[in-house]
Image (tube, grey):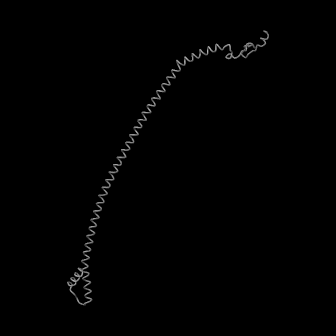
Amino acid sequence: MASETRAATVETEAGTEVTAEQKAPFPPFNPEFFASQLLWLAIFFIAFYYVLKKVALPRIGGILEVRRDRIASDLDHAQRLKEQSDQAIAAYEQALTEARNRAYAIAEEARAAAAKVSDARRAESEAELARKLAAAEQRIADIKTQALGEVNGIAAEAAEAIVAALIGGAVSREEIDRAVAGALKE
């Protein structure tokens, strides 16, 4: 049997010999090593848990706390800025309303001043037109008076010419003037 064992000896690439009897299953799957593997698993798990609990988790917790605080402060700062912007918007709206009211008041004052100036100019124009109308009426009255005065003279001349043509003689100017004045009165 020793010869068979020696015959089953295989030379590996590294130069070590492995026999057929030595070929066992992969060590992690070998039931013979399960107990020691479980023991080492428990030891490493406890050590890993201890390292995580004492080193990594406090650091992660600190980082999370810092982030939470930073987020809270950023949210508070954003809220303050939002309130400030709301106040600025309200102040802007108030100033805009006041400016509109002032502009409306200025426009009303300008309208009133323009109306005053316009009324004054219109009154001046009406007064000028009234003066011109009075002057025109006076001229018309003068022309009418003059025309009426001339009508007497024209009527007297026409009457004199008619009497001279009808009678053939001359009549005095005073008689003709009295006759024309009497005819005009009727």
Asked if residue 131 is positioned above or below residue 93 in the image, the reply reads: below
Q: Nearer the viewer, residue 3 or 23?
A: 23
Which image quadrant is residue 130 in? bottom left
Is 144 placed left or right of 1 in the picture?
A: left
- Tell how many labels: 0
Which image quadrant is residue 123 in? bottom left
Which image quadrant is residue 49 in? top right
Q: Nearer the viewer, residue 140 or 38?
A: 38
Is 175 placed left or right of 14 in the picture?
A: left
Q: Quadrant of the C terminus?
A: bottom left
Q: Quadrant of the N terminus?
A: top right
| Residue 30 x/y as whole percent | 69, 15
| Residue 117 x/y as whole percent | 30, 56
Q: Residue furthest bottom?
A: 168
| Residue 45 x/y as whole percent | 59, 17
Is 21 placed left or right of 42 in the picture?
A: right
Q: Nearer the viewer, residue 111 or 46?
A: 46
Asked if residue 56 is positioned above or below residue 168 in the image, the reply reads: above
| Residue 52 x/y as whole percent | 54, 19
